[in-house]
């Protein structure tokens, strides 16, 4: 993979991610107005279970397939590319089918003893038969990521969101009449059917789209399917196990939150509302800019794997360093944005829901959440899943302890403090591993010092930027949109001015400039 395709692929995913998140926000605004904070809280109880199952099944296969395909493509063994994806598809279908049967026979235990809310029964029941079809998409995604063709996955993400919101809008009135339990079940059905439409589109692309640059011209280097199965299992099993442990701890963490809020003196409606505002309203806003880091992390896995397979550690370090630099700039900019305009942004998206204070508190997690995502991609690309698991368990344990012991006395702010502390510790541990593995040095001047200086200036300018648009006499929503847009433009300009962003290197990565940056001319 060349530098151009590495970054270009990430940009395509970012563009698709931007569109899908915009559609997702329309969906979430509609859903929050439809079922309220309590309904969002109930729906968010299902999401950790859904994520635990789907991510466990899909993350290992997707990463394993993309890594193996990238390595085989780099070595010119194109005959193995589709063989790898077919083996991955068969494996994930078999595993997910077995798991669905096990879940069906244990549904009462899940609803009554794990979620502890009988209203989630219908949602879980409807989710179970959809699992194999949703999981199957991971093999196709791994195939497209491995050949550095991200357009099909980008389009499928948009289709998924459109289908999901169309189902909700078409059937909402009928399900609402049956009660909150069935309204949440509708949201679960929309999520599942949207994922299945994603699979359908990827399968069509896989079947009919031809890519001449990977068309096998001989059977050179062919690997037997038995060996491919062993190789995929060897790569996917530790990743899926990691994801299972991490997702299980994350699910325990978020399911405990409303229970510990109850222990702190809130009633069930209040605790579910507080939980819904945190996980279903404020957190999605914080995660919106993460489309950049998730896209970079996705393309980093095959990019780093390819560079390492060719023993080109200079190229791998360059990609890692630039990705971290972009992530840190993003984290500082949006931390300042959400901290400066929490009420204005929250009221624009969720009018009358009083989410501003929760958004303000969560704003200080931006840097750590975004950085954790990019470091996850780097660790997977380097094949350090075991150490990543250990580091993640440490972080999850800290958050669970904060949830259990601190939330009853101090509420949601204690949990957010735990998120910041745990993410900081995990990032430090991951950095130590990456530096030992690659020899990469910390660049605190570009990663921390310069972005932090710009952030201080942004805090000082925030009120002036917002007030500047008073003369237009616009409605509050439009004034907020203009202020946020101006804020981001000014922030990026200042980042470039102080050297936190090097436009020449970014243009080179995009392939717009032919002139090489001297520092990396041997890469």
Image: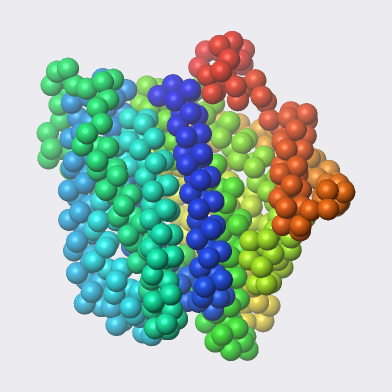
Q: Quadrant of residue 246?
A: bottom left
Q: Position of residue 424 (x, y in %)?
A: 62, 53
> Is there any visible trace of residue 257 in the rendered image?
no
Where, by quadrant of the figure, is residue 210 drawn?
top left
Query: 322 and 15: which one is in front?
Result: 15
Direction from residue 398 to residue 128 in the image, left or right: left
Q: Position of residue 430 (x, y in %)?
A: 53, 46
Residue 53, visible in the rendered structure: yes
Residue 443 at what x, y percent from top left?
66, 33
Which residue is pictured at 60% across the width and 76% down the height?
A: 274
Horizontally, residue 426 falls left or right of residue 153, namely right
Question: Extreme top residue here?
Answer: 515
Q: Position of residue 507 (x, y in %)?
A: 60, 22
Residue 500 vertical placement versus 121 (above, below): above
Number of numbered discs on residues = 0
| Residue 134 placement: quadrant | bottom left
């Amino acid at each position: 993979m060349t530098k151009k395709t590495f970054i270009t692929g990430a940009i395509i995913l970012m563009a698709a991610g931007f569109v899908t998140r915009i559609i997702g926000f329309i969906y979430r605004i509609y859903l929050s107005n439809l079922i309220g904070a309590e309904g969002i809280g109930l729906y968010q109880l299902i999401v950790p279970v859904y994520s635990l199952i789907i991510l466990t099944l899909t993350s290992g296969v997707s990463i394993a397939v993309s890594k193996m395909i990238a390595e085989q493509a780099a070595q010119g063994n194109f005959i193995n590319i589709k063989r790898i994806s077919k083996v991955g598809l068969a494996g994930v279908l078999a595993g997910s089918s077995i798991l669905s049967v096990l879940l069906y026979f244990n549904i009462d235990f899940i609803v009554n003893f794990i979620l502890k809310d009988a209203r989630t029964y219908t949602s879980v029941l409807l989710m179970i038969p959809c699992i194999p079809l949703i999981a199957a998409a991971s093999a196709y995604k791994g195939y497209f990521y491995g050949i550095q063709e991200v357009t099909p996955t980008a389009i499928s993400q948009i289709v998924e969101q459109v289908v999901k919101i169309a189902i909700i809008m078409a059937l909402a009135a009928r399900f609402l009449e049956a009660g909150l339990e069935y309204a949440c079940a509708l949201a679960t059905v929309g999520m599942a059917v949207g994922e299945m439409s994603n699979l359908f589109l990827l399968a069509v692309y896989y079947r009919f789209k031809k890519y001449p640059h990977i068309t096998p011209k001989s059977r050179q280097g062919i690997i037997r399917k038995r060996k491919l199965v062993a190789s995929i299992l060897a790569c996917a099993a530790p990743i899926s196990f990691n994801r299972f442990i991490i997702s299980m701890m994350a699910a325990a963490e978020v399911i405990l939150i409303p229970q510990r809020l109850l222990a702190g003196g809130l009633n069930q409606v209040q605790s579910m509302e507080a939980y819904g505002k945190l996980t279903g309203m404020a957190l999605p806003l914080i995660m919106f800019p993460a489309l950049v880091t998730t896209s970079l992390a996705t393309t980093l896995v095959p990019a780093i794997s390819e560079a390492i397979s060719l023993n080109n550690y200079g190229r791998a370090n360059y990609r890692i360093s630039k990705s971290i630099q972009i992530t840190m700039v993003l984290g500082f900019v949006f931390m300042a944005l959400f901290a400066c305009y929490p009420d204005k942004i929250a009221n624009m998206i969720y009018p009358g829901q009083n989410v501003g204070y929760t958004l303000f508190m969560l704003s200080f997690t931006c840097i750590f959440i975004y950085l954790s995502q990019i470091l996850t991609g780097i660790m997977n690309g380097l094949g350090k899943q075991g150490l990543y698991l250990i580091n993640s368990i440490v972080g999850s344990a800290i958050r669970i302890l904060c949830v259990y012991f601190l939330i009853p006395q101090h509420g949601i702010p204690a949990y957010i403090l735990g998120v910041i502390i745990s993410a900081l510790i995990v990032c430090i541990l991951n950095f130590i591993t990456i530096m030992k593995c690659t020899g990469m040095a910390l660049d605190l001047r570009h990663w921390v010092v310069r972005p932090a200086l710009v952030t201080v200036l942004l805090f000082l300018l925030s009120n002036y930027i917002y007030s500047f648009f008073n003369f237009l006499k616009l409605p509050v929503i439009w004034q907020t949109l203009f202020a946020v847009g101006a804020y981001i433009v000014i922030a990026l300009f200042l980042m470039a001015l102080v050297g936190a962003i090097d436009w020449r290197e970014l243009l080179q990565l995009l392939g717009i400039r032919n002139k090489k940056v001297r520092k990396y001319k041997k890469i």
